[in-house]
Image (spheres, rainbow, N blue to C red):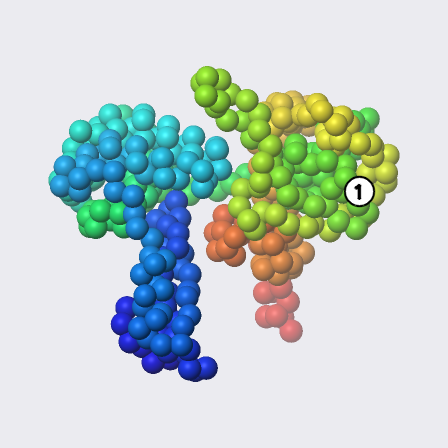
Amino acid sequence: MPRRGKNIYKRKDGRWEARYVKEITCDGKKKYGSVYATSYKEVKVKQQLYILQPNKSHNPISITVSQLIDEWLSSIKNRVKPCTYQKYESVCRNHIICELGLTPVRFISHFTIMNFAEKLSSKSISSKTVNDILIVLGLAFKYCEITYNITSPKINYIKVERKEMRVFSVQEQQILTNYLLHDIDIHKFGILLALFTGMRVGELCALKWEDITERQIIVNKTMMRIKNDNGKTEVKIGPPKSECSNRIIPTPKCLFPLINRFRNTGYVLSNNKLLFTEPRLMQLKFDKMITECNLEKANFHTLRHTFATRCVEAEVDIKTLSELLGHADVKTTLNRYVHSSFELKQKSIEQLEMSLIS
């Protein structure tokens, strides 16, 4: 495609195409749109009409980190989930503004951020939390770079040793399953549903009976607890974690009898159209059940990781597993959810032995 001018091209069909920035996402990425015309001059005029003009509220020479943070938070408030905005705002208020707020942005250097990270670490803040704070700071600087043309300082993140996520062994899973099936109630059924589908606890709590058929389970919402304007927390139901988290999971056939037994209307975990069971209550119930099973401590997310591990052991391909889990990127599945269980290691050794013998 012949090019003439910034983001202006002549197409194979003879028309001219010009691209323009139509949106800047909350993480600083640019989304482009296109306009078309029969001549270069005409398409350039159209492009100028559509170019996004950043709303500069401050002087780029004197804007401070605190002013930048306020402006950035305001720009993303209606473009991210409430819980995400709340997290960003909390990080900014509790960590960034109190340390860097009065400093002009143009004076923030790579070394400033290194010293900032070291100071955070000295407060016994975990390396992961320090990185989370630096990520939020980096997003604000990306906004600044696009809006005020101030080059973002380099940010070096702390190397974090990833802890191995707890996964139930086949034997532990069998013990838990037998316990859940004995004198089963709706909450035990919910835990079985999570164990055999890999749903997140918020997705499970937001699930309604109308979302479940004998063929499929539709996951299109989640439940979360966030702060309201009065500073108190309240339960909200909204879209799932990401667009890819909207998914359809085949209904496990082994759960058909239980689905038919408990089927009602409203929320699955309460059998009520208005009342629901929230995630932290499910975690408390799960903790109690784990104790009664005499199993090692585990959180609710262990069910999701166990589901992923059993799928790997059953040789489910990673792409399919990633879609079942609702991940936006297969790398997330590979790096965080593919665990090599003892049973899988043992199977690999046996396969190696067989290949050497034969």
Q: Name above or below for residue 320 compared with residue 176.
A: below
**Judging from the image, what secondary structure is the residue with disc 1 in?**
helix
Q: Position of residue 342 (x, y in %)?
A: 59, 48
Q: Quick one: 239 or 58, which is closer to the camera? A: 58
Residue name at image x 22 percent, y 47 percent? 148
Q: Position of residue 267 (x, y in %)?
A: 73, 31
Q: Quadrant of residue 306?
A: top right
Residue type, mark 1 in image: Leu
Quarter of the rendering occupied by the N terminus: bottom left
Q: Position of residue 337 (x, y in %)?
A: 54, 48
Residue name at image x 60 percent, y 28 percent? 279
Q: Name above or below for residue 229 compared with residue 343.
A: above
Q: Quick one: 320 or 21, which is closer to the camera? A: 21
Viewed as shown, does residue 138 lie left or right of 274? left
On the question of residue 233 being in view, the answer is: yes
**Which residue bears the numbered disc 1?**
255
Residue name at image x 32 percent, y 26 percent? 93
Count of number-bearing discs = 1
Q: Quick one: 209 or 261, which is closer to the camera? A: 209
Quarter of the rendering occupied by the C terminus: bottom right
Viewed as shown, does residue 27 lie left or right of 193? left
**Label 1 CA crowd tier, 10 Å (few <14, some 14–19, many 20+):** some
Residue name at image x 64 percent, y 67 percent? 354
Q: Position of residue 32 (x, y in %)?
A: 40, 60
Q: Quick one: 354 or 281, which is closer to the camera? A: 281
Viewed as shown, does residue 250 lie left or right of 75? right
Viewed as shown, does residue 188 lie left or right of 350? right
Q: Quadrant of residue 34?
A: bottom left
On the question of residue 342 being in view, the answer is: no
